[in-house]
Amino acid sequence: MATLSVPPVLSSPRDDAMQLFRAFKGMGTDTSAVINILAHRDAAQRSLIQHEYRTLYSEDLFKRLSSELTGNLETAVLFWMHDLPGRDAIMVRQALMMNTMNLEAATEVICSRTPSQIQVFKQHYHAKFGIHVERDIESCASGDHKKLLLAYASIPRYEGREVDREMVVKDAKALYKAGEKKWGTDEKTFIHIFSERSAAHLAAVDSAYHDMYGNSLKKVIKKETSGHFEHALKTILLCSENPANYFAKVLHKAMKGMGTNDTALIRVIVTRTEIDMHYIKAEYLKKYKKTLNDAVHTETSGHYRAFLLALLGPNH
């Protein structure tokens, strides 16, 4: 797993907790100081800072940050304070709540994670909310989209790179029969293959499909399916081949046209910073001939902009 490319941290978690307390004191918050500390600490350090803050001041740092910050900055910083699985659990829970429902976000988080990431975030989900994520999926999603999410979230999948060539060809044929060759679409076959096969296997199926039938699975999915089901299948497929390329597209879409989809922008930057952000930045530059930092700089402002750019790191 990638770590934050940040300058060496010279202060201890205790020092950081004290500096944060000072930043909150008096009239107004020294927001720059808060950003400077928190954006340059990894998950383990952030956890220690929270522990030290509570020990020193008998106060929850989350609650303090929530009362001192506002808007998109508050959202981004509070998400950042969690570790990866805890954050995924909270994002999916929010996306599956009736008053904040965002099935696109829930689909993205679930379908872009590895099987082991899903297992850990499911444990956090149950521990935090006292309900299994599958129950929330049941009540919020519908149709083939629901079937795929439930299968993808619960079936263990191999995470290695080896693939069985015979099985790859068999799956490519099955998908052809279930889609392009058929009048209508056999969604069951798509759900079965996309929820049970490893990422390496699916990438190989896509390549074999193209060789055998002259079409990409992405195009087939677009033609044969629609809505959230299409989005889930595409997310699984694209993340099996190149997750960084997938997230570069999500970020570009979030900043394209009039207005910015800050929910998506925050979700991707905050969740991928400690995983594969340097690859996403490279893909973004290659694809859109502009650095991700420059795009974020154009679309955001103030302390919110400063925080996101601090997470993104050097502009190259």
Image (cartoon, grey):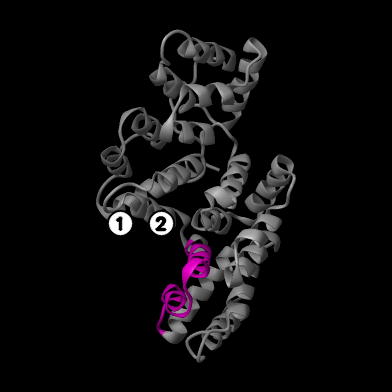
Q: Which SS type dominates the magenta stretch?
A: helix
Tell me: 179 left or right of 296: right
Residue 283 in percent (x, y) is at 36, 53
Residue type at mark 2 is Asn
Residue at 53%, 84% (x, y): give it: 185
Residue at 64%, 56% (x, y): give it: 115
Residue lying furthest top: 26
Q: Which residue is mark 2?
A: 245
Residue range in magenta is 214-238
Residue 287, numbered circle? 1
Residue 202, numbered circle? none
Q: Nearer the viewer, residue 207 or 248?
A: 248
Please say if 264 is above or below 301: below
Residue type at mark 1 is Lys
Residue 30 in percent (x, y) is at 41, 15
Tell me if residue 219 is in the magenta stretch.
yes
Q: Is any atom of residue 114 visible in this view?
A: yes
Residue at 58%, 52% (x, y): give it: 98
